[in-house]
Amino acid sequence: MRTTARRDFQLFWAGQAVSLVGSQVSALALPLTAALALDAGPVQMGLLGAAAFLPFLFLTLPAGAWIDRRRRRPILISADIGRGLLIAVIPIAAAAGVLRIEILYIVALGSGCCQVLFDLAYLAHVPSLVPREELTQANGRLQATASAAEVGGPGIAGLLVQAVGAPLALLLDALSYLVSAVSLRLVSTPEPPPTPSTASPSLRAEVIEGLRFLRRQPVLRACAFEAAQYNLFNQVIIAVLILHATREIGLEPALIGLAFAVGSVGSLFGAALAPGIARRIGVGPAIAGSMVVACAAPVLLPLAASTSLPAVVLATSFAIGGFGVAISNVHIVTLRQAITPNAMLGRLNASYRTLVYGAIPIGALLGGLLGEVIGLRGTIVVGAVGIFVAPAWVLGSAVPRMRRVPDHVDMEGDR
């Protein structure tokens, strides 16, 4: 990697590290704000989770086609600034004494829109910063950083919430997005111009083209269906987990944050070991095996309330699950980037994420409703069972037989 390219990737990497820590603070501080400061119930917690991910359902497809027509870095910077300003609304409203659950819904929805734009542009921008042969290494570093943020972020969030309250803790996330925006602005590697679309001139046609590309890629399609089912039932759990931990188990915010932090060590190890595991057993077996591990871990969650050390059980489940998810994420992201033409990356990622992330708001609403009907612990059991069977999509596909990341994967219908 050239010196300038290495410097620019390190700038990009450093900005993401700061932003990811802030995001982990918000991931815990936002639901704790709803549960502790506003006394939200299961349905309201489900609505909050749904608001954050609803944009992935209705915005992702057109955004992917739109991003393919534009340079990605300005989109990344704008999305970071937008998220920072939106998150800052919550501590300001709390200080003014006007914070309501509806404000949390609006901020979550707006931040979700910015997140969609950022994530799609981010995935499509990385290949312009590093050579193709270094994509796995670069994605491994980014995933390791995300995992490290998962280790430190929740612990910081728990301590901040315990010390200054959940709304004020969100200021750290707002500032982190501004740091990320500045680091992106300092990147100097020229971005390749967007490839003009001649075959699909309309936005609608480009959206359809991205969906068709995913539909005809059996390997990516199997991974997408597995991830969608995982996200659906994982969000069923997440919708009620904070309420279960605070009201039924009786854990303090600092201890909840510590459980998440200790559990996230598994993600850090998974990201660090992902390249070596794939070299030893092959990319396909690494993806399939890590998915099985990740989907078995939530079975431990309903047991936490029955033990004398519930935080340890939660942390163990998070660690095992994070280890598996981190390994599969590194290789699946690399697979998508490697076999998809640059001009199609935005649309492919949009189609993939619409399916995968579009399941999250549905899961959040389902989790909130189940929490009211069958109770918090029963809802976690339903989510754990749904996740446990998700790897069937991949185990029945060609993924376990892949030994390396291919240059091209035959599409259904090709001759």
Image: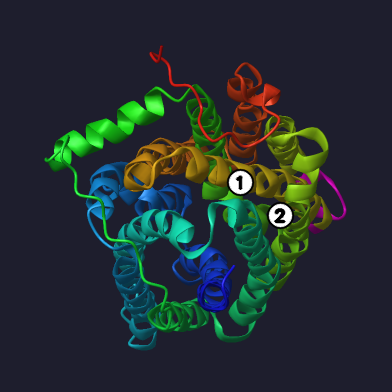
Residue located 62% across and 16% down the image: 396
Residue, disc 1: 329
Helix, strand, or loop for circle 1?
helix
Contact (Cβ within 8 Å) of mark 1 with mark 2: yes
Amino acid type of the residue that numbered disc 1 sits on in the rendered structure: Asn
Residue 389 placed where, x, y %? 64, 24
- The residue most toward the front is 2
Is residue 98 placed above or below 221 in the rendered structure? Answer: below
- The CA distance from mark 1 to mark 2 is 8 Å
Q: Can residue 184 be seen in the rendering of this structure?
A: yes
Residue, disc 2: 271
Q: Can residue 35 be seen in the rendering of this structure?
A: no
Image quarter in which the C terminus is found: top left
Badge count: 2
Is residue 42 placed above or below 70 in the rendered structure? Answer: above
Helix, strand, or loop for circle 2?
helix
* Depth check, front residue: 30 or 321: 321
Residue 23 placed where, x, y %? 52, 69
As for residue 310 lying within the magenta part, the answer is: yes
Residue 245, quarter of the rendered image: bottom right
